[in-house]
DNA sequence: CGCGACAGGATTGTATACAATGTTGTCCCG
DNA sequence: CGGGACAACATTGTATACAATCCTGTCGCG
């Protein structure tokens, strides 16, 4: 059994991390089957470890576990997509407001670093990395607000958003988030809670409107429907 | 190996359910160690199954997994307690508002049933069951709002609240939630979203104020501190 | 008598073997 | 030639064996 690309993982944490990253960066497409043996071989661990990793990701809704059938990269339905962004709309603006009240210069620097990374990724044509940086930006704000519980919810929602974008993003709308993010940093730096709240709300609305969620609500993308027989 | 108190469990689901119920009803106190062999014997399954159940509960923050040390019923810190109720304050009022717009008579009946069950449990002196019914009431509202994603967050927060109440509830304040719940049902039945939002907000504030969270913020209840050496 | 090293036992972490289940290709029959 | 039963295979579900780690009680030394 090969040692794989990294050293000792603490009980599947590393495997889950790697898989989550791959999903986040759209290297693993929604619907992809994750064979336990295969994943295990790739990372040089036994199925036991792979299994715990898959379970964790399943709980985060990044993959779907189907009994006796295996693990698949999740395919959020349109309804689920809506719900995720509604949840974000409930959590993030208020969190950004809280963050504004306690943003330090160091925080501003960190946020700016994320934006820079994102720019660089876009320039390099690495859309996956750019998307991930964009997600980390949102997460960083939750962290600044010093609300671990809410931050964890947001982390999960951001991760799921990545899948949603993979499925429903309509190209014509370039999701050029840089401006929105930059404005947010400005508001935070000035400790303008009202403005941060407002900006975040608008930013999330922009995000949703860059998606194509026009199908009938709550229609799971089934094979029958996809092939329109 | 004994078959245990129930039939075929689908990969630890049943075990997790049972343990969660026990925690919810305060039959398992915070800090209790959950020995894998022991739990396995009780439910007639192997450690493999127990392990998956423990992992799931760990993700829900109902138990804490400490590497090489085992699983323990979680002991939310005061800080965590505050955060959980802040998250609920962010999610539940708006959810109750949404629910109000789509509450059907059948929903009202279901909610009333929860309240009745709660009353009955209180009358029977079964505080654990009463607490559980109270939690289910909140969950039912999220369900009525037809927002599965948010409902799941609320479910987790309600479960954690149960642990928090176990740790920090001060007896003098009888957490007599019946009135608040009854008023909420009334608002929902009348489809009064504004009032539902307001009532839920107040209800959650009452809940928090019935707790004793006066310690220094973010101070984990360590042994050193508990014994004041 | 107190304190630290050490060893035994208990418990968790990981891998693997076996059972159960689902999938798919093939063959036979209409 | 089409369709359904069946069998071989692949994959996941579960149990168990072994390794690694931690806790605890004991012993010896200062």
Image (spheres, coloured by chain):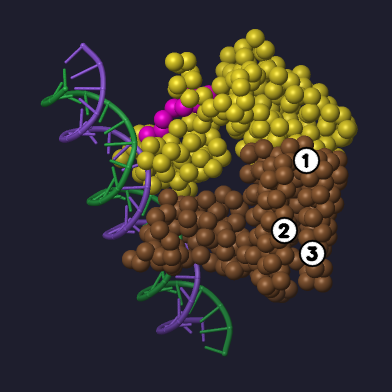
Chain colours: A yellow, B brown, C green, D purple
Of the image marks 2 and 1, the number of the one nearer the N terminus: 1
Residue B115 numbered tag = 2
- Mark whose residue sits in front, 2 or 3: 2
Mark number for residue B176? Answer: 3
User: Local crowd at mark 3 within 10 Å, few (<14), some, or many (≥20)?
Assistant: few
The residue wearing badge 1 is: B100
Q: What element carries label 3?
A: loop
Mark-to-mark CA distance, 2 and 3: 11 Å
Q: In the rendered image, which quarter contains the N terminus of chain B?
A: bottom left
- Image quadrant assignment for residue B92: top right
| Cα separation between marks 2 and 1 | 18 Å
The local secondary structure at tag 2 comes to helix
Q: Position of residue B25 (x, y in %)?
A: 62, 64
Rendered view: B95 above or below B159: above
Q: What stretch is highlighted in magenta?
A: A26-35
Q: Do the residues at discs 2 and 3 belong to one chain?
A: yes
């Amino acid at each position: 059994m090969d040692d794989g690309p990294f050293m000792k993982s603490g009980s599947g944490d590393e495997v889950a991390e790697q898989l989550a990253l791959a999903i986040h960066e759209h290297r693993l497409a929604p619907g992809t089957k994750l064979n336990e043996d295969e994943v295990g071989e790739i990372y040089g661990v036994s199925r036991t470890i792979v299994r715990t990793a898959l379970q964790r990701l399943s709980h985060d809704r990044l993959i779907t576990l189907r009994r006796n059938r295996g693990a698949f990269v999740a395919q959020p339905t349109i309804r689920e997509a809506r719900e995720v962004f509604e949840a974000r709309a409930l959590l993030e603006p208020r969190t950004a407001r809280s963050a504004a009240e306690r943003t330090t210069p160091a925080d501003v620097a960190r946020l700016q670093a994320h934006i820079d990374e994102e720019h660089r990724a876009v320039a390099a044509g690495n859309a996956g990395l750019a998307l991930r940086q964009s997600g980390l930006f949102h997460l960083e704000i939750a962290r600044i607000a010093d609300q671990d519980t809410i931050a964890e919810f947001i982390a999960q929602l951001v991760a799921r958003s990545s899948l949603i974008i993979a499925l429903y993003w309509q190209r014509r709308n370039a999701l050029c988030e840089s401006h929105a993010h930059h404005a947010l940093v400005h508001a935070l730096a000035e400790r303008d809670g009202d403005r941060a709240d407002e900006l975040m709300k608008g930013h999330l609305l922009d995000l949703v409107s860059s998606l194509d969620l026009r199908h009938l609500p709550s229609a799971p993308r089934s094979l029958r429907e996809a092939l329109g027989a």
